[in-house]
């Protein structure tokens, strides 16, 4: 491992963080919608499809970020967790 391998690619990490945030925003909106469907007695198909879409999109985004290295993967995870924080904060304020 050389010093060049340890250099962080800031533009890629920034884009990965934005992708992680967008993923997280969609992921937690879909999770909220899934919970509403289950609580209100919706048939099993809609919640199942939303769950498969949520997990599948998370896998694809994180695998894509991993192709650019550990820095991009960690940045996308940070964006995802930031979206989780924002969603939880907004749901607490409306409740």
Image (cartoon, grey):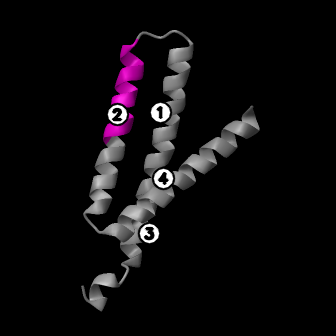
Which numbered circle lies on residue 14? 3
Image position of 59 (left or right of 84) = left
Can you say whether 48 is above or below 1 in the image?
above
Can you say whether 7 is above or below 39 in the image?
below
Q: At 42% from the left edge and 21% from the top edge, which residue is drawn? A: 47
Q: At 48% from the left edge and 52% from the top edge, which residue is drawn? A: 80
Q: Mark 3 falls on what kind of element?
A: helix
**In the rendered structure, which disc, 3 or 1, sits on the residue that comes first in sequence?**
3
What span is colored magenta in the figure? 44-56
Instruction: Determine which quarter of the picture holds residue 45.
Output: top left
In this rendered view, identify the residue nearer to me: 18 or 82.
Answer: 82
Crowd band around label 4 with a 10 angstrom C-alpha radius: few (<14), some (14–19), many (20+)? many
Queried whether the magenta region covers residue 47, the answer comes back as yes
Q: Mark 4 falls on what kind of element?
A: helix
**In the rendered structure, which disc, 2 or 4, sits on the residue that comes first in sequence?**
2
Question: Which x, y percent locates residue 60?
Answer: 29, 48
Q: Mark 1 falls on what kind of element?
A: helix
Residue at mark 1 to residue at mark 2: CA–CA distance? 9 Å
**In the rendered structure, which disc, 1 or 2, sits on the residue that comes first in sequence?**
1
Q: Label 4, on which residue?
A: 80
Q: Mark 2 falls on what kind of element?
A: helix
Residue at mark 2 to residue at mark 3: CA–CA distance? 25 Å
Which numbered circle lies on residue 85? none
Q: Main secondary structure of the magenta part?
A: helix
The answer to whether the residues at label 4 and label 1 have Cβ atoms under 8 Å apart is: no
Which numbered circle lies on residue 53? 2
Q: At 35% from the left edge and 24% from the top edge, which residue is drawn? A: 49
Position of the C terminus by quadrant: top right
Give the mark toward the camera: 4 or 1: 4
The answer to whether the residues at label 3 and label 1 have Cβ atoms under 8 Å apart is: no
Q: Label 1, on which residue?
A: 30
Question: Which x, y percent locates residue 3?
Answer: 30, 90
């Amino acid at each position: 491992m050389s010093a060049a391998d340890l250099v962080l690619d800031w533009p890629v990490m920034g884009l990965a963080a934005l992708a992680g945030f967008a993923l997280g925003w969609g992921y937690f909106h879909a999770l909220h919608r899934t919970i509403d469907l289950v609580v209100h007695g919706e048939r099993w198909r809609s919640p199942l499809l939303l769950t498969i879409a949520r997990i599948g999109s998370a896998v694809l985004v994180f695998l894509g970020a991993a192709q650019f290295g550990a820095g991009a993967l960690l940045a996308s995870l940070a964006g995802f967790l930031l979206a989780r924080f924002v969603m939880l904060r907004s749901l607490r304020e409306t409740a």
